[in-house]
């Protein structure tokens, strides 16, 4: 059965997605016509917001709490994008904050994927996701060069754990 809440959510998401897609396409068109500024800035900002929205809609998340967090981070990404769009100096000095909600969404996605794995891997994977989230926040607060390498290593370990471990369903059969 269709409820009013579900219908309005789908309608709002589609309108927002169409708006962001058109904004991104128009910005890219302006860049190809060598009108770089402010269209380059606008295309980056709208592309990250669109990517957050797509990840929140396409990925099948099992936990309703994580689903709500991912959608709220998508909304936060849109708000940050609007803030950066209106203030050019903020974009020049703090541009990396634009990608923080996207990284949080990926961390939550990794967290949900680890809930589908075996118990031995699940706890290690969740700890790794939590460390990834904390180190990412620390990276945005203080800029340390070696922290970048550790973050890349941690994302590689998390990806390898997700790829090469068995899920609960294959463990049971």
Image (spheres, grey):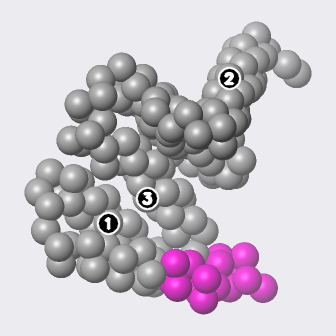
- Residue 104 shows up from this direction: yes
Q: Are marks 3 and 1 in contact (CB under 8 Å)?
A: yes
Q: Are marks 1 and 2 in contact (CB under 8 Å)?
A: no
Residue 29 falls in image quadrant: top right
Counting from the top left corner in percent of width and height, residue 32 is at 66, 43
**10 sits to left or right of 116:** right
Residue 76 falls in image quadrant: top left
Nearer-N-terminus badge (3/1): 3
**57 sits to left or right of 101:** right
Query: Looking at the image, which residue is at 61% across and 83% down?
Result: 163
- Residue 74 shows up from this direction: no
What type of secondary structure mainly makes up the magenta span?
helix
Does the stretch in magenta take in 47? no
CA–CA distance in space, label 3 to label 1 = 7 Å
Is residue 166 depicted above or below 109 in this figure? below
- Secondary structure under tag 3 reads helix
Count residues near mark 1 (Cα–Cα under 10 Å), then give few for <14, some for 14-19, many for 20+: many
Nearer-N-terminus badge (1/2): 2
Please tell me whether mark 1 or mark 2 is closer to you in this view.
2
Q: Which region shows up in magenta?
A: 159-173
Counting from the top left corner in percent of width and height, residue 161 is at 51, 83
Which residue, given by chain and number where applicable, does mark 3 sit on? 107
Count residues near mark 3 (Cα–Cα under 10 Å), then give few for <14, some for 14-19, many for 20+: many
Q: Name the one closer to the observer, 23 or 4.
A: 23
Query: Looking at the image, which residue is at 36% across and 77% down?
Result: 152
Which residue, given by chain and number where applicable, does mark 2 sit on? 19
CA–CA distance in space, label 3 to label 2 = 26 Å
Residue found at the far right of this picture: 1
Which residue, given by chain and number where applicable, does mark 1 sit on? 132
Counting from the top left corner in percent of width and height, residue 86 is at 36, 20
Residue 52 falls in image quadrant: top right
Does the stretch in magenta take in 160? yes
């Amino acid at each position: 059965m269709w409820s009013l809440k579900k219908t309005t959510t789908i309608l709002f998401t589609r309108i927002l997605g169409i708006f962001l897609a058109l904004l991104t396409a128009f910005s890219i068109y302006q860049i190809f016509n060598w009108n770089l500024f402010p269209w380059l800035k606008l295309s980056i900002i709208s592309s990250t917001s669109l990517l957050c929205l797509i990840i929140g809609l396409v990925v099948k998340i099992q936990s309703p709490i994580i689903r709500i967090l991912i959608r709220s981070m998508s909304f936060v990404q849109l708000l940050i994008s609007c803030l950066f769009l209106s203030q050019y100096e903020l974009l020049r000095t703090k541009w990396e904050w634009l990608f923080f909600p996207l990284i949080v969404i990926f961390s939550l996605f990794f967290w949900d994927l680890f809930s589908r794995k075996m118990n031995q891997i699940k706890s290690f994977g969740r700890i790794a996701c939590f460390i990834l989230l904390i180190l990412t926040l620390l990276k945005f607060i203080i800029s340390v060069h070696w922290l970048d390498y550790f973050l890349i290593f941690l994302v590689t370990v998390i990806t390898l754990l997700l790829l090469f471990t068995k899920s609960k369903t294959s463990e049971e059969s």
